Image: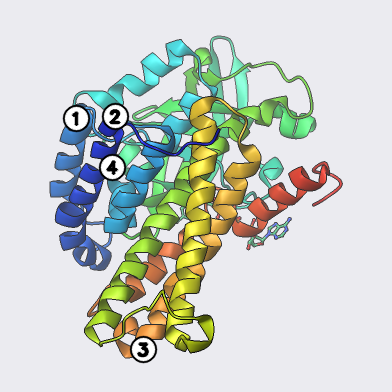
């Protein structure tokens, strides 16, 4: 039976996340939006401290709800908070217990540390089989060469801390996706360089960089999963397992920003004397009431999909279909609702006086990274209709 009820200790963690979002994230939200690439030191120290005390360590449904709350506060600041991030999720999904210890322990001790994951390249975004970065075996080492772009938290992971980056590269170009493997590269490894900090539309408090690899040597046992090139899809299994975790989490980020916009919209309408009357027949509702209820219903549908995908994950049930459903729906809903909130607020929505325009800018990325809306819809269609990748492109 599906049950999304939280244990009391998880409930307390989610409430604490909301409290932090309100008291720590929101007050500095606009500042770090307008001061891109400035370090939010007060946030970093506090979040690291909380992490070391076991806060923000929840997985599954509770983990998603905490992410949602923090992104209600500010999605960019959530991403900027120290922790294993996408890199950690990849190690967790595809690594061995020994690798968990070797690569993940640093996120619970010492100084603030970040993790990142690099799949995208100038010629390989949605089509990950086009990845050109290579990993060549040389005795007890792998030698990495290539360029990765749009790496979230790459600067903080590699330049500002002793973090890790999980890099996708091919060990055999002729094998296609079967040849693709992931490798953990630790900060400070010679041959790896952070080249460029992107200036972005939204989530400006997070950093996004290009990372290049030139004869970058890493130990052989930094490969996640098996080194042999076997079946057609074997190599890509690690990436898929990572997406099963990260897609619902990105969807939870989308839910947080969207709920922030909905809450603010309701408050502002309230100030204008407009109450949403849930108890009048549809024919008697105003246009704004209908719009608002439709936005809320769409948000709720996305929310339930996220909870379901995370509930499956925590119970060990395969969730690839539901993870993509949640991501596609939440990314779309976030884009449409935050944009509608700007429209409904008119000039106040477009100005920087309130945060509506920021929510709209912050929301859009959720329909792009971890698989665009179109790609996740394609994944859903393939799985529902039982088509292979080659049959439905
Ligand atoms: C701020 C930011 C942070 C990011 N962080 C990371 C990160 O940490 N690590 C990482 O590896 N990547 C990251 N990315 C990259 C992101 O995952 C890619 O941008 C995304 O996968 C899309 O790839 P692309 O940009 O090459 O677009 P393309 O693949 O060129 O797609 C362009 C458009 O075509 C559509 N499209 C493509 N193929 C199809 C198809 N078969 N059917 C229908 N439509 C299709 C897409 O949906 C999209 O709308 C980040 C990107 C941004 C902007």
First along the sequence among labels 1 and 4: 4
Q: Position of residue 51 (x, y in %)?
A: 23, 32
Task: Report the quarter where the N terminus lies.
Answer: top right
Q: Which mark is residue 111?
A: 1
Seen from the viewer's position, the closer of residues 392 and 60 is 60
First along the sequence among labels 1 and 2: 1
Above-or-below relation of 282 to 166: below
Q: Which mark is residue 14?
A: 4
Spatial CA distance of label 3 from label 4 is 33 Å
Q: Position of residue 233 (x, y in %)?
A: 74, 29
* Label 3 sits on residue: 346
* Label 2 sits on residue: 162
Task: State which image quarter holds ligand 1.
Answer: bottom right
Q: Give the SS element for disc 1.
A: loop
Spatial CA distance of label 1 from label 2 is 8 Å
Q: Using a 10 Å C-alpha cutoff, classify the residue at mark 1 as few (fewer than 14 neighbours), some (14 to 19) or many (20 or more).
A: some
First along the sequence among labels 1 and 3: 1
Give left or right: position of 228 versus 97. Answer: right
Which numbered disc, 1 or 2, marks the residue closer to the eye?
A: 1
Do the CB atoms of the residues marked 1 and 2 lie less than 8 Å apart?
yes
Give left or right: position of 75 versus 168. Answer: left
């Amino acid at each position: 039976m599906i049950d999304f009820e939280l244990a009391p200790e998880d409930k307390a963690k989610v409430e604490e996340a909301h409290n932090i979002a309100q008291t720590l994230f929101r007050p500095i939200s606009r500042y770090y939006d307008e001061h891109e690439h400035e370090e939010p030191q007060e946030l970093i120290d506090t979040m690291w401290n909380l992490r070391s005390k076991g806060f923000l360590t929840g997985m599954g449904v509770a983990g998603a709800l905490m992410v949602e709350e923090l992104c209600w506060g500010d999605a960019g600041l959530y991403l900027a908070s120290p922790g294993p991030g996408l890199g950690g999720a990849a190690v967790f999904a595809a690594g061995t217990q020994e690798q968990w210890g070797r690569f993940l322990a640093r996120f619970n001790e010492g100084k603030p540390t970040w993790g990142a994951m690099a799949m995208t390249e100038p010629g390989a975004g949605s089509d990950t089989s086009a990845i050109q970065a290579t990993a060549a075996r040389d005795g007890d080492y792998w030698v990495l060469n290539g360029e990765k772009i749009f790496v979230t938290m790459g600067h903080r992971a590699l330049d500002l801390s002793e973090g890790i980056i999980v890099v996708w590269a091919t060990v055999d170009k002729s094998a296609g996706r079967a040849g693709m493997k992931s490798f953990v590269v630790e900060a400070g490894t010679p041959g790896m360089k952070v080249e460029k900090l992107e200036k972005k539309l939204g989530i400006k408090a997070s950093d996004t960089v290009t990372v290049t690899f030139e004869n970058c040597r890493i130990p052989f046992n930094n490969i996640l999963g098996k080194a042999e090139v076997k079946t057609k899809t074997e190599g890509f299994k690690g990436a898929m397992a990572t997406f099963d975790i990260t897609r619902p989490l990105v969807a939870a980020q989308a839910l947080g920003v969207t709920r922030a916009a909905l809450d603010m919209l309701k408050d502002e309408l309230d100030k204008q004397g407009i109450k949403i009357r849930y108890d009048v027949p549809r024919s008697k509702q105003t246009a704004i009431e209908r719009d608002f209820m439709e936005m809320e219903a769409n948000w709720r549908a996305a929310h339930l999909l996220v909870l379901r995908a995370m509930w499956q994950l925590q119970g060990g049930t395969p969730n690839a279909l539901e993870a993509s459903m949640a991501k596609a729906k939440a990314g779309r809903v976030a884009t449409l609702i935050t944009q509608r909130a700007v429209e409904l607020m008119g000039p106040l929505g477009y100005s920087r006086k309130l945060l509506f325009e920021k929510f709209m800018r912050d929301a859009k990325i959720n329909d792009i990274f971890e698989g665009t809306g179109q790609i996740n819809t394609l994944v859903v269609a393939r799985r529902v209709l039982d088509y292979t990748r080659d049959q439905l492109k």
